[in-house]
Each structure stands twice: as C-alpha cells, then as structure tokens.
Image: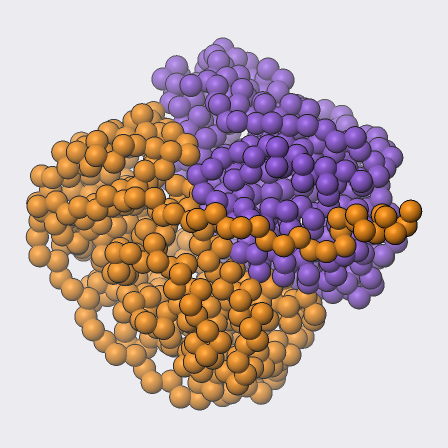
Amino acid sequence: MNQLHIPLESTKLDNGLRVVISPDRTAPVATLGVYYNIGFRLEPRGRSGFAHLFEHMMFQGSEHAGKMMHIKLINSSGGVLNGSTHYDVTNYYESIPSNALERVLWLEADRMRALKVDDENLRNQRDVVKEEVRVNVLNQPYGGFPWLDLPPVAFRNWPNAHNFYGDFADLDAATLDDVQQFFYTYYSPSNAVLLMIGDVTPDEGFTLARRYFGSIPAGPPPPTADVSEASFEGLRRGEVEEKFGTLPAFAVGYRAPERRKPDWYALAMLDHALHGGRAGRVYRRLVLEQQIAVDTAGGIHYPVGDLFDYNGPTLLVSRVLHKPEYSSDQALEAYDAVIDAVCQQGIEQDELEQVKVKFRSEYVSSLEGGQGASIPRYGLMHYLACFTLFDNDPSLVNSILGGFLQVTREQVREAAQRYLDPKRRAIVFRQPTRTGVAA
Amino acid sequence: MMATIAMNDPFAQVPALGPERPVVWPARTHRKLANGLEIVLVESHTIPKFTGELYFRSGNASAVAQAPALAEITATVVRTGTEERSSRQIEEDLRRIGADIGTSAGADTSAIGFNGLVEFSLDLLKLVAELAQRASFRENEFERERRQMIEGLRIARTTPSFLANERMCRVLFGAHPYAIIAATESQVKEYRLAQLAEFYRAHYRPGNAVLIAVGDFAAPQMMEQIDRIFGSWKPAEVPGVPAVSLPRLRGRHVHLVHLAESVQTQVLVANHAITRKHPDWLRLALANSIYGGAFNSRLIMNIREQKGYTYSPRSSVHALRQYGYFTVNAAVRNDVVAATLTEIFYELDRMRSLAVAEDELSDARTYMSGVFSLGLATQDGLASQLSNVYLYDLPEDYVETLRQRVRALTAADVLAAARAYFDSANAQIIIVGDRRQIADQVGLFGQITEYDAEPN
C-alpha cells in the first residue's frame, strides 16, 4: 500500500538527454512530454514573463516544421498538444494514438535541435500572451490571486519575487536575440528529460529516442543560478486592489521546506489537515462553522503548482475570501485561531489517519489524471519529470508515498510550530473597490 | 560525406503514421433494477479506484415553475446532511475512506458524483444512497448555503464569461426554461427550504436515475453490491419537463453587456442548432472541429496565430436534452472587436460556401476519432463518454460505432451541416465589455440592445 508498482524504464543518451518510459497497454494511446529544467524563476532580469513567452515561441516553428506545422501534424494524427511554464520546469506534451509516436518524437527532436522563428512570430505571440494575461488576470475577479501577489511580498531575491506572467513593458522589450539566447542557454538535451507513457514498449521508445534525439549536440550546461532566499524576518504585508470581485480577501504565505526533507512530509500532512476540502480545518471553521469566510483554499506551492513540482524557495499558502461585514482583521483573527490551535495541540490521531488515506487516494488519481481526461496520465508524466530533473530518480514516483504515510502526530506538531509562525509570514490583502450590499 | 548524411538524415521527412492498433471499447454491464434504477458498469483496472455519477434526469429546467436554479441549491444542500449523518460527519467519513463527492445540477440533470478507493466502495456507495434517499435539509445548513450562493453570484456577475453565457441563454431560449442559468439575488432570498425538500422528494427517484460507475472492480460483484444498497429505494412517478418552443430569431442582433473598466472584450456569437440525438450531430461536430473546435482549426489559425487578437478562441457545439446550440467564443483586446467579428463571420461564411478540401477533411476525421480514443485510457474518460450515451438517450452501441461513423463523413456532409447550423445571417452577437470602448465597433454588426451586468 505504501509502495506503488508502476512499470518504469529509463536511460540517458550520450548527449545527456534522459529518457523515461512507462508502458501501459490499456488503450492504443500514449502521452509524450519533453521537460526542460528551466521555468519562470530563472528568466532574465528586465524580461519578466519571458520564460512563458518563450514557451509560446516553441510552437512557432523549427527547422523542418515551420509555423503551424507542429500543431497541424499533431492534430491531424488524432492527437492533442500543449505546453506550460512552471517555476522550475517548462513542459511540452502531446496525447496521441500510439501509431503517431514516431512522428511526435520527430517534431519534439526537431524543435530541441533547431528552433526557427522570426520577428513576425515574436510580435504575434507577444500579442497572444498579452490577451492570455488579460483573460486570466487583468480582466477577471481575483485574477492572479495570490500566485502573482504573494511572491513580491514574501521574497527578496528577484528570481523568486518578480512578476512571472510579465509586465507588458518587459514583454514588449523582448527581442529575437533574447529568444535565441534563451534557447541556447537552457534548451539543450542535457537539461531535459523525454517521457513516454502508455502504449509504447521500452525497446521501441529507446530506439526512436536515439534515432531522433541522439544526434543533437549536448551543449554547455546552463549557468548555475542563485535562487536562495534569506529566511523571513518579521511580518511582510502587501495590499492589492480588487477591481471586479465583491468580497475582501487575503492570502497568507509561510516558507515551506525543501522537497523530501523530513519536515516536508510532515508539513504535507498538516497542509492536508488544514486545506483538504470541506473537512479541512480552515474551511470547516471559517466557512462551515463560523461563517466568516465564503471560500478558503491552500496548499504547499499553491495554486500554480503542488508538493512535487518546485525546486527552490516556495510557500505554504492559505487563501481566504470573506464576507464584507467582517473586517480584514476580524477574518484574519479567526484564521489565526485555527493556525494557533495546530501549533499548540497539533492534530488528532484519527484526523491524521483520515488525512493519510485521503492523501494516498488523491495521489493515485493525480497520476492518472491531472489535466482532465484528454491528456491521459499527465500527472504521472509530470511527477516522473520532476523526480528525474530535480532528484535524478524517477522511481520516487513509486516509493514517495511511504514517507507521508509514516508521519507521526508529533512530527506534525513540530512542523506546525516550525513553519506556521505568525511572526514570520507574508500576507496580501485584496480589497474590492466595489462591494455588494450585505445580505 | 555530405551526401551520406543527407541520405540518412532522419529529419528529412515527416515520419508516416504507423499501423493503427484496434480501439476497443471495454465491455459494459447494463441493468435495470425492479425500482427502475438503471445501472451501467465498466471495469477499468488502471488505478485502484472507481469513479461515477448517480444522475437524475431533472435539473433546473424541471423546477422553473417553482424557482430559478432550484435544482442547483437543492443539490448543494443535499450534501450537507442526511437522517443518519451531520455535515461534519459526512466530510470526515469521506476523508476516512479517501473519497470525494460532488453534488451539482445543470439545466437537465441533478447529479451525485463520487470517486474513491475501491477497497472502500461499499462505504462510499452507502453514503451516495443515503444522500439520494435520506437528505435531511436542515435549516441552518440551508441558510448558510443560501448566503454562499448569493456571494457566488455577485462574483459571477463580474466574470465576463459568465455574463456572456447568461445573456446568450436568455436570448436563444426566450420563454423556455433553458433561458435562465442562474437566479438573481432577490430570487435566492425568496427560496424556501420546503421548495428544496419538495424538489428532492419529487425528482430524486430511482426510475428517474442512472448510476454509472467505472473502475477497478469486478462488475458482477459490484452489481450485486449496488443491488443490495439501492434495491429497496422506493419508486415514484416523476413530473416531466414542460415543452416550450424557442423564439424565432431573425437577423443579426448585438447584445451588449456593460462591464465597466474591462480591459478586454468577451465576444460570443451563437445560434440555435441540434441535440445529440439528431442524425446530423456528428456532421456538425466535424464541421465545428474544422471551423474552430481544434487547435489547428481555421478560426484559431486566423485570429490567434495570424492576427494575435486573442489567446483562446474556440467554437463549440452544445447539446441539452431538448435543444442544442452552436457558439463561437473569443476574449479579445478592446480595439479589435470589429476586426474579430469580421473574421468570425468570414470563416463561418467560408464554411457555408465552399466544400472543404479532401486533405483537410481527412485530417479532421482522424482528429475526431483520435481524440475519442484518448478517452479510453482513463476511468474519468470512460465515465464521461458513458454519461453522454445515457443522459442523451443515444443508441446502445453509440461509443462502439462512433469512430467508424466519423470516418464515413464526406465533404458534402460538412458543407450541409455548416449551411444548416452555422446560421451566420441570424447569429446573435453577445458582447461583454466597457461600452465606452466598444459600442461604435459592434454597432456595425446589428442593432444593439444594452444591458447592465446586474440583472435586477
């Protein structure tokens, strides 16, 4: 029960590209991904939003597959595709009928080998990205809350503290030279992992990987970067205007431990006890019982990531939308009482047992899903990629559960005291400029 | 040397597609209990879990004479208590067995969705049965959820996509119950707990329900378990949905919902279309995929990849049980609203005027049948394909034969579907944005009726 048995095989090509294959013949389909060990944390200064803009450029053409060819070749093979930029990785992935496997590897290898884009492509995608930022952030209630609001308040080192979606002035300043430079610096085979999940045999997969990726030059290793962050001293507060939404809101961020440190397992259990759905202490107390809040949520590396997909400083986040008849101070006080209780008494034994079952259940589901049914086993691919790039051990996907299921009450209480310190945290308030009349 | 390299260059040509492996829909078990409950089971052993829904064929449309969105608030309150368990007990019991439940309602259905570890399937199904038969409708839970709904609505009414959908349904459906997708604040304040309990008593009945479950179980044992848990559920006659005809919409009309300070404009073009049972459904679905339903479709290549007006334009075919409709959506920057509408109509009219070329047609057929096969790899994917069959009364072999029916479609089919259902001459144009920035652009496309974001 503590150990899964997902079949895995992996190898490393001469140029440093790691290849991980997890065969499964349930249906004649496969999910493929290429993950690069670069995300928005390390984009160049003065170029906020660049890693994500660059991700868009990877769909704009490579030496043998010009603009629109990439998308057309996948769709016309019966497949779907996308990419996404995270803190520390950027991924490109496809789900396809398995008879298109070779074609997809050809396409992914071609763009790893020779991205070929021009100024017109860059202008086009800059416009597209601006509309993406508008539709997701600038023209939505609670847009970017709190994933864009907390980092600049919580952190001091630019890689952790800047606007990851990008200031429009920075997007405008990006040049084709920047694109090529970023490509040569970070998009080399030795800084990547190729994953094949589903209807593919390891023999077939490794052979095709060598055929298409084997001749790509290794390239120099990317420069080492300092993403370290001094620990919090004191309370850091910020305020952001909420232009559309009608409820006041706040988000709290506590520094989270490094992945796979003993505290990390304990804090994950505590996080689940606090933020795990309607049974979680924060929702139960603030929404269901006291009825001060209307919605609460949270998690480690929440909301644009999770427990497994970061490799640098991050936060344990709580997000609270509360009724306008309560002041921010009153709502925060109610939240603090919940936090204070776990710091003083920890959680109950029965509660910890429940959390462990739920955690195991959610982990298994996240491997099969993660992006809805159209990308089968996206989650398995995603975790395999992170465990390969960050830990050099894809088999952690099978063994990692054990560490969570061994956590004790005492460890949870210690983690609460160590990390949920009301004197060392960041808080951002979202204050609506218009508020509905109280019911 | 150069010649040798060129000859062996694996990049010189796009690799051909390999031979296809057969796509086989897993066997299913389908049975009706004596009390009328329909049960559909499919085994899928990918993960040690199971997932499913208990659907009732009654949603907000069934309750429109009592109150708007009554099915929705009923579903919300259903999960907050049963005769045996308090709200807190339900939530903790779910966590104890690693399960999730979601209760919801749309226009046509109310549903209790569930997923959990198979080792606890008995406990989870017992809870589902309790929620379906013995929800307790406590006053304090209801009052909390009422307030939650009001706060949710206030936020929804600042969300461009919600405002566009709400207005579109009012325009397309007129006096039909489908016109109302959400209650107003004052209507929510008027709900009475007895109305919820009455809707529940009348519609949460076995003869009105289908239970779909997919997962890592043995179907015969699961069927036995379900029979034991749900077999004693009392049947009753369920009131039907009133049949109301739709407004006849002639000519383009612009419906402008003013949302002050919008830095982007939500464009939505819509017209009446067909249900999933209609013989033209797949023809229309294929035409939609070529027009704006896939990443490499004409609309997306045009207004995103060539012109950069928008991030995620998309056209879709929607089917409710009684009626269907076609939509084109794009969130665009404020100064290209007229330009976007021009391209939307240009591409619609091109689909209506000219037959698609053979290669574009063949690509689209492969896309549709390929994407369908992706759904077979996961429990969620199988469950969602199954629910289409049983909620929309499709033929029993619908999913098994879908790929071969898609592959038989022709350019003439696509052209006929576009002419019938891409009704560009009578399209309704819904615009959500700041009127000061866009009114003169949209006036070019039809007479404007203006609305505020607040419906009260």
- On the rendered structure, is A125 left or right of B79? right
Residue B78 vs residue A411: left or right? left
Task: Please determine whether, in this image, residue A257 is positioned above or below residue A85.
Answer: above
Q: Colour of chain B?
A: orange
A421 lies above or below B335: above
Image spot of residue B291 (x, y percent): 53, 71
Corner quadrant of residue A59: bottom right
Report whether B6 appears left or right of A36.
right
- Point 33% across, 62% down: residue: B183
Residue A254 occupies quadrant: top right
Q: Which chain is purple in the picture? A: A
Residue at image location 55% in from the left, 53% down from the top: A79
Q: Nearer the viewer, residue B15 or A195?
A: B15
Residue plotted at (56% across, 35% down): A201
Quadrant placement of the C terminus of chain B: bottom left
Percent of width and height locating residue B390: 26, 55
Colouring method of the image: by chain
Q: Which residue lies at the image location 63% right of the left edge and 42% below the top edge?
A: A33
